[in-house]
């Protein structure tokens, strides 16, 4: 177990010491709980087993996303169908007509 020195001001130490006595726990137990909560708050795994599990899940998610991207690329590389091409052409012609009709006509 790694040991580190921690310094507190007098008021903080008094509050921690009172909590320790009320809960009948050691300072080490309170510190362990506090640091576990801190890691949880920042979405960090507290133990190696959890780290490995999350890493494996992340790798699996990345592989799934890469497969989807590959599927999109193969679908996008195909030639457009004549039906979708004609629909695009009709849409652009209709849009041009609307624009033409909205412009005020200036007499010559």
Image (spheres, rainbow, N blue to C red):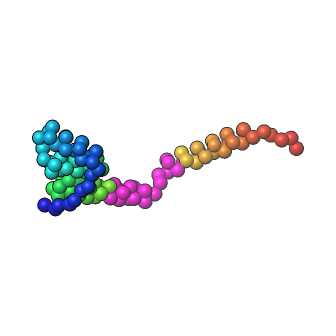
Name the residue: 24% across, 56% down: 6
Q: Is residue 69 magenta?
A: yes
Q: Mostly what secondary structure, the magenta segment?
A: helix
When asked about the image quadrant of residue 2, the answer is: bottom left
| 47 or 21: nearer the viewer | 21
**Quadrant that contains the C terminus:** top right
Front-lying residue, 5 or 61: 5
Where is residue 22? Give x, y as percent: 15, 37
Say which quarter of the image contains residue 15: top left
Left or right: where 42 falls relative to 101: left
Vertical position of residue 107 compared to residue 56: above or below:
above
x and y percentages locating residue 46 in the rendered image: 20, 53
Image mark count: 0
> Residue 23: where, in percent of width, then height?
14, 39
64 within the magenta span: no
Name the outermost residue toward the right: 108
Front-most of residues 89 and 98: 98
Please indicate, yes or no, whether residue 37 appears anywhere in the rendered image. no
Magenta region: 66-86
Give x and y (percent) for residue 4. Answer: 20, 60
Q: Residue at x 13, y 61 (%)?
A: 1
Residue 14 visible? The answer is yes
- Determine whether 72 is above or below 107 in the image: below
Q: Residue at x 14, y 41 (%)?
A: 21
> Image height check: is 71 above or below 11?
below
Q: Residue at x 43, y 56 (%)?
A: 76
Left or right of 41? Residue 72 is right
């Amino acid at each position: 177990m790694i040991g580190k020195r921690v310094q507190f001001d007098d008021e903080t130490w008094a509050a921690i010491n009172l909590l320790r006595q009320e809960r009948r726990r050691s300072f080490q137990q309170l510190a362990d709980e506090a640091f576990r909560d801190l890691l949880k708050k920042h979405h960090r795994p507290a133990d190696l087993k959890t780290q490995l599990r999350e890493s494996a899940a992340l790798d699996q998610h990345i592989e799934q996303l890469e497969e989807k991207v590959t599927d999109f690329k193969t679908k996008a590389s195909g030639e457009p169908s004549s039906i979708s091409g004609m629909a695009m052409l009709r849409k652009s012609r209709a849009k041009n007509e609307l624009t033409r009709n909205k412009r005020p006509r200036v007499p010559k």
